Image (tube, rainbow, N blue to C red):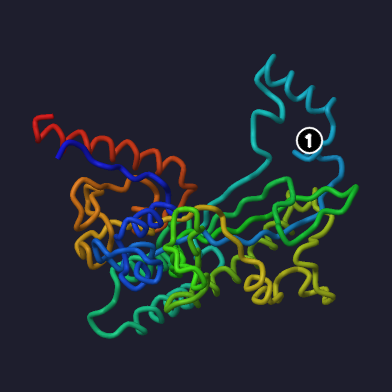
Amino acid sequence: MEGEIVLCAGTVQSPQLLELSGIGNPKILMAAGIEVKVENNNVGENLQEHMMTAMVFEIDPSIVTPEDLRADPVLAAAADKAYIDFHNGPRTAIPSSIAYLPFSHYISPNELSTLGASILSKSPTGSTRIRDVILTNRLSSNTNLGQIEFNFDVSNYSPYFRSLPGKKYATMLQMLQYPFSTGSIHIPPMKSEDKVRTTSADNPIIDPQYYNGPGGAIDFQTMVASQKFAHKICSTKPLSDIIVSRVFPPLPPSSSAGKGEDEDFADWVRDSTITDWHPVGTCAMGGTEAEKGGVVDARLRVYGVRGLRVVDASIMPLQISAHLQATVYAIGEKGAELIAEDWKETGW
């Protein structure tokens, strides 16, 4: 072998390129007119996202927001000058405050225990997936993990709420860090009318499956509970001093529900959950289950193929509690190290 291919197309396109090359689930490949070279039903599966909701608040109009800089050339020029001359001002920081909290901050130990037991009880004896055991253990009330990210950002980040002229807004984002729900990314079948095989020009089908599957109810219940706590944060001083009112979802007419204590956010979570653009897992490492549980081995080599590796976020078998950028850098560095080690052994 004179070389190898290193696939770094990301969680969306790495499985797409594997499938277009004949590596994947035979049913999906044959429907796309692709010859099956290596059968592996895990390609494109195990998609995990940081599911996100965006609660929007009208804020004090005197607060400078990114929209002000975009709308006012004079203000933008002053911000640029402050950055260039003194390395300070609005160009030096993002206008947000972030905290990662365990569920135990606002969900009782008994409820967390019940949620964990529910996922394990749905699996036949001996067939419980390793990932479900790991995720269930993380639900423990004494586990100090960042299970939800709360991010208060001075801007309107909701795709469902349109800003009104003359108003200023902030968004409280809630992002679930360790989802049980898994989706998939696969190439589409060939078009029936022309019988032309699927190519890279055909966009892959992304099916996130939020809140579905055996653990979907856990994801949903914890996200609903997180909305109540987010509303409580924004109703507490000193943050509440800059907030005029919550505008999305609109406050209910009941004054007690308006405090968020008894408010039911279930319908809003179901209708408003979006992606946080942190997809992982579609070419996951198989671990002890090897090709039965994944796509690549511990050295990032694709099972059943010589001279092919995947080195990007798609190889992560589980989501992490963080934004992905630093971890993806680490995967790249580690991948380079593994490749160098393996080639050194061959005398290269």
Furthest residue to the top? 85
Quarter of the image with the N terminus in it: top left
Above or below, 31 relative to 155: below
Q: Nearer the viewer, residue 99 or 50?
A: 50
Q: Residues within 10 Å of mark 1 (few under 14, many from 20)?
A: few
**Left or right: 308, with 346 as reference point:** right
Residue in the image at 54% along x and 53% along y: 277
Furthest residue to the front? 194
**Left or right: 1, with 22 as reference point:** left
**How far across and down, in percent of the image, does residue 231 sit?**
70, 62
**How far across and down, in percent of the image, does residue 50 sit?**
51, 58
Residue in the image at 34% along x and 79% along y: 120
**How far across and down, in percent of the image, does residue 33 sit?**
37, 66
Q: Nearer the viewer, residue 94 or 116?
A: 94
Quarter of the image with the C terminus in it: top left
Above or below, 232 relative to 128: above
Residue in the image at 48% along x and 60% along y: 204
Q: Quadrant of residue 221?
A: bottom right
How many labels were placed on the picture? 1
Furthest residue to the right? 166
**Left or right: 32, with 124 as reference point:** right
**Left or right: 96, with 311 as reference point:** right
- Judging by the rendered image, the residue that carries numbered circle 1 is 70
Q: Nearer the viewer, residue 347 or 189?
A: 189
Above or below, 35 relative to 300: below
Residue in the image at 32% along x and 36% along y: 333
Query: Label 1 is placed on what type of residue?
Result: Arg
